[in-house]
Structure formats: C-alpha cells, structure tokens
Image: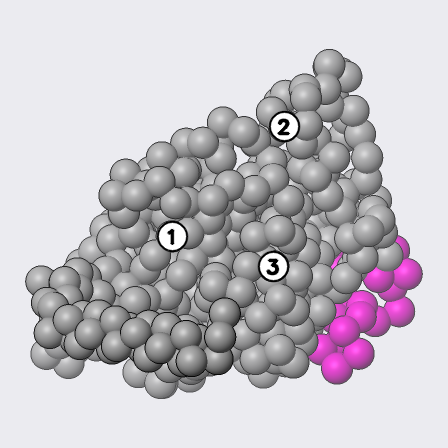
Amino acid sequence: MSRQNGQLNRRRFLTKTLSAAGAAAVAPMIVPSSALGLNGSVPPSERIVVGGIGIGRRGTYDLSCFLEQPDVQFAAICDIKQKQRLGIKKIADDHHGTDKCAMYRDFRDLLDRKDIDAVLIATGPNWHATAAMTAAKAGKDMYCEKPVTKNISQSLILKETMRRTGRVFQAGTQRRNLPHFAFACELARTGKLGKLKKVFAHPAGMQAMMSGWLIPETEPDKEVVDWDMYLGPAAWRPFNEKLLDGFNFEKGGGLVGGGVLEWGSHCVDLCQWAVDDCAPPVEYNAPKDGYLVARYDNGVELIFRETGWIPLGSCPVRFEGESGWVEAGDSGKLVLSSPALLAGRKVEEIGGYPATFHVRDFLDCVKTRRQPKGNAEAACNAHIACHAANIALHLDRQVKYDNQKHEFIGDEAANRLRSEALREPWRL
C-alpha cells in the first residue's frame, strides 16, 4: 500500500469512527432502575455482598433474615454437603432472580473472592472459631453462630484476632437486640435495681458431655460429603452419619460444652451484659442441688440454675439488686419487682427470639465500622465464663480463674482443659 493510499484509508476510517461515536452519543441509554436505587432497590455501591459457610438448619433461618434486608446480595455458598450447597443456591437464586450464586466445598476458595464483604458462619461449633479467624485474616466481616468457641484458649485468640484485624464480628447472640432483654440489662447495669447482687442464667442441662466415636460407616464420595473437611480441626474419627448434625467434637480430655455452653452462651451473655460486660467470674463452685454458683471479682454472683424460674419462655435470666429485681424470657415479657422500675416506659414485647434485628445491627456496623452488640470481646468473655463453669462441672469441684494470666490458679487438671490439640493444617 502506498503512503498516499494509507493516509486516505486512515482518514476514511476516522470519519466513520467519529460518525458512529456521535450516533452513540445521541442514542438513548437504558439503565436498570436497580442500578440507580429506584423503586425501593439499593444501588450496587450500597450493597453488602455476603457469602455463607456451612448453612444448615439454623443457618438457613439466619440466611432468611439476611435476605430480608434490601442491601444484601448473597453471592456464594460453601458447604461440605452437596445437598446443602444445592439447596442454599436455589434459595439465593430464587430470591435474587438469577442463577449466579456460586458453590464451594472448601471455604478458603470462597474467602479468596475479593467481591465478598462479609460471611455468615453457621457450621457446627467445631468450626466456628477457626472459620471466623480465617475469614478475618482474609479481610471479611462475619456473623458467626454460637457457641463461637470450643474452649478458653480459642476465646482469647478469637478476641485478639478481631481486635488486631479490625473486622466486624457479630456472635449469634440475637437476644442482645431484643427490647425486653435490653431493658432488663439496662436496669441492672445502670443501678436501677440498687447495687447488683446476683445474676441468674439457665443452662438447659447441667452436664458435661463427651462426643466419643460411633460405629464406622462407609464414607461417602467427597463431592457428596467431605468428611475430612467436616472434621476440620477435630481429631480424626471414622465416618458416621449421625455425627453430621453439627456436633461439637471433644476438646482436651473429651469434654464438650453441654447445656452450659449451648444455651448458656445465650443466657450467660445476657448476664455479662447486665454486669456491664466486665471480665468473667473468678471463682466457680461445684454444682449443688441444681445450682452452680460463680463469683465475679466485685462480689456479684453468677448463678446457673435449671429450676425455679417464672414461666416466661426459654432462655430465662434474672437480675437481683439490693432494691429490686427483674426477670425475662423468650416470651417477650418482663416481670419486675415494682411497676415503678418501668418509669412510665413501654417496653416492646417481641417473643420468639427473632434474629432479624441482630442481623440488621451487624449490617449497619459493616457500613459504619462500629462495634455490634454481640462483638467479639463481649461474646468471648461470656464464653470463657461458660467454659470455666463447665470445667468446674466436669471436675466436680471449685476452680479459680485469673483474668490477667488467663489460667486457673494452681490447678493443673483445670488448666489442661483450657485448650485442645488441633489437627493439621488447622492450627490457629
């Protein structure tokens, strides 16, 4: 091609290109209303992209609370069970009207995604702390079901990890965002009951449990059920389908949480809030007549008891001061020693312990970077109290805990139960 012909061809090309650009400039652009935040939708820049890790029965309920929020985009599910992966993908895709919810068997692949802002962790308790700390190190915020830790050492490491990484952590202790429980704790915390003397928690079973092994069964294909990943940090044991229910595999000498940790992590959490989220109790006595009495450094008693409650529903708590008391439960109702404690206020009654308000608190904190109600420090202090009480229950004697050194005073047997060996590669 000659230089002249080349120049003419380039001139002709530029003329056509500019003409096309001009036509495009005057052509109408169709932008979906969802991209602009119209018709009640939330623009993409304001949405929180969420992934799920281990979404079973409880997790499916939590997910429904997330999907109720207009600023949530649920983008991915990780589960060791193929059936759960497919089921959660269908829920998310049906809700969003797409087929884009991704599926993973290894939660680390989900955490590698840069577009995911936060994760819902609803695995069995065996995985909670390990998954949460891995998510924090990957730069994700998290809503983590309880119990959030398996032992005292995990509680301390989890709390420190969230402080160091600056991630937003919300434990699934949703009663902190229910009005009647919040009001009861406020009465105790602000001196409206007089000097606080006793706080009562319902443990839903005063027993220290063992997980043990079950009869070996044929292990499924890894794509159907990834048994090795399900065990995760727990000691290996042969597959048995009955263990696929989120069981909290044993720690140390074979001790797991029992009712003290399962329900206790809700009730003790409220008691911790009532004492202004101070450090856990320093003394835990052996159980007697259905009671286990612990004592805070300031003399307030934390009393685990199974009976003697006013019938106000599950997860009851009671706070007693020198001049008054209050009791509350999952019915949404309060019983007060005096109507004067209401001081003319009307406390909204919301029964059934819904998680919607707790999820909303978490999402707001993801945006503002403030601490949510069930933050890591509050949750882990409550869990330490549960773990220490469980150790006293297991040993059937008094134990004394040092909140500065984070160890039991002069008690080798109790100190061995503070932690457990973790299976490779899941060391914290």
Magenta residues span 397-415
**On the rendered structure, is 318 left or right of 109?**
left
Q: Quadrant of residue 279?
A: bottom right
Q: Earlier in the sequence, mark 2 or mark 1?
A: 1
Indicate the amino acid at tag 3: Asp
Indicate the amino acid at tag 2: Glu
Q: Earlier in the sequence, mark 3 or mark 2?
A: 3
Residue identified by numbered label 3: 112
Query: Could you tell me how far apart the alpha carbons at marks 2 and 1 are, in whole angstroms?
Result: 22 Å
Residue 223, label in figure:
2
Identity of the residue drawn at 46% across and 48% down: 76
Image coordinates of residue 178 in percent, x first then y, are 29, 63
Image coordinates of residue 220 in percent, x first then y, are 68, 19
Q: Are circles 2 and 1 on residues that touch, CB within 8 Å?
A: no
Indicate the amino acid at tag 1: Phe
Identity of the residue drawn at 78% across and 53% down: 426
Mark 3: which secondary structure?
loop
Identity of the residue drawn at 36% across and 85% down: 191
Q: Earlier in the sequence, mark 3 or mark 1?
A: 1
Image coordinates of residue 402 in percent, x first then y, are 76, 76
Q: Which of 318 and 146 is in front in this view?
A: 146
**On the rendered structure, is 373 left or right of 134?**
left
Q: Are circles 3 and 1 on residues that touch, CB within 8 Å?
A: no
Q: Where's the C terminus, which quadrant?
A: bottom right
Q: Quadrant of residue 186?
A: bottom left
- How many tags in the picture? 3
Residue identified by numbered label 1: 74
Image coordinates of residue 311 in percent, x first then y, are 29, 46
* Circle 3 residues within 10 Å: few <14, some 14–19, many ≥20: few
Q: In which quarter of the image is residue 382?
A: bottom right
Res. 347 visible in picture: no
